[in-house]
Image (tube, rainbow, N blue to C red):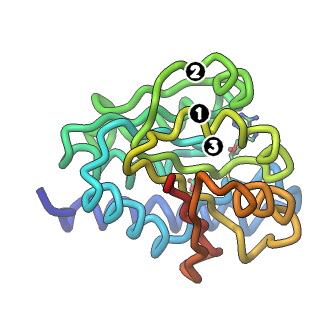
Amino acid sequence: MSVTKDFLTQVHQLYQQLQKHDAQQTDRLLRYRSIEPESAHLLGMLIRAQQAQKILEIGTSAGYSTLWLVEAAQSTAGRVTTIELDLERSLQARAYARQLQLDAYINLLTEDALIFLQQCSEQYDFILLDAERDAYTQYWPYLMQILKTKGGLLVVDNVLSHASDVEEFMHLVQENMQFTSVTLPVGAGLLLVTAH
Ligand SMILES: C[S@@+](CC[C@H](N)C(=O)[O-])C[C@H]1O[C@@H](n2cnc3c(N)ncnc32)[C@H](O)[C@@H]1O
């Protein structure tokens, strides 16, 4: 199943709408901070190439990235679990997914990612980490456990745009010989991590 023109038109309109909102907000935390479209497109391609079925997103916001993950999951018979702290944003993400008739493939959780990770006993083929960067070092021990050993892929956004924020996290990943990683200069900079 390929990405349809209709999907591209609708996500493009949503992206513009969310960007317009963000441009009017001075408080960073009130912005939706959607991933760049080229990054979102790449995530969808990676899911297709990997044939990922168990997909996790940490940091839903209004669900722009989620729509791309779910659109790809539809073609792999997969499912996306996405976590957001803010109820209003979760509800917004649900509404957009319904609008695009993709809600059947999403498990939308409104909770703190750290609590989710501490309690998680599942393994995921694909994980997108796009929340508050200062928490990533705390997440890493749990992410290591839940990323599928054979062929699992963790993608972290903003590693070039906010390099100093993720320095310690990047160091933890890079010094761990169980994993290999690469930074792609796509969008705000994507770190790709997989187990050896
Ligand atoms: C950069 S935005 C995510 C953007 C989204 N991935 C997209 O591209 O459309 C980060 C989101 O993470 C959420 N967040 C921050 N800390 C969190 C936490 N501890 N648990 C769950 N969500 C969190 C924020 O509320 C915010 O909506």
Relative depth, front residue between 94 and 110: 110
Instruction: State yes or no: Cβ of the residue under disc 3 lies below 8 Å from any atom of ligand 1.
Output: yes
Residue 58, compared with residue 81, is above or below; it is: below
- Write down which quadrant ligand 1 falls in: top right
| Mark 1 or mark 3, whichever is nearer to me | 1
Residue found at x 49% / y 56%:
196
Left of 136 or right of it: where is 40? left
Identity, as a three-letter code, of the amino acid under mark 1: Gln
Circle 2 — which element?
Answer: loop
Proximity of marks 2 and 1: CB atoms separated by less than 8 Å: yes
| Mark 2 or mark 1, whichever is nearer to me | 1
Question: Which tag, 1 or 3, sits closer to the chain's start?
Answer: 3
- Residue 59: assigned label: 3
Task: Quote the CA–CA distance across marks 2 and 1.
Answer: 9 Å
| Mark 3 or mark 2, whichever is nearer to me | 2
Proximity of marks 1 and 3: CB atoms separated by less than 8 Å: no
Relative depth, front residue between 128 and 91: 128
- Residue 145: assigned label: 1
- Residue 120: assigned label: 2
Task: Quote the CA–CA distance across marks 1 and 3.
Answer: 19 Å
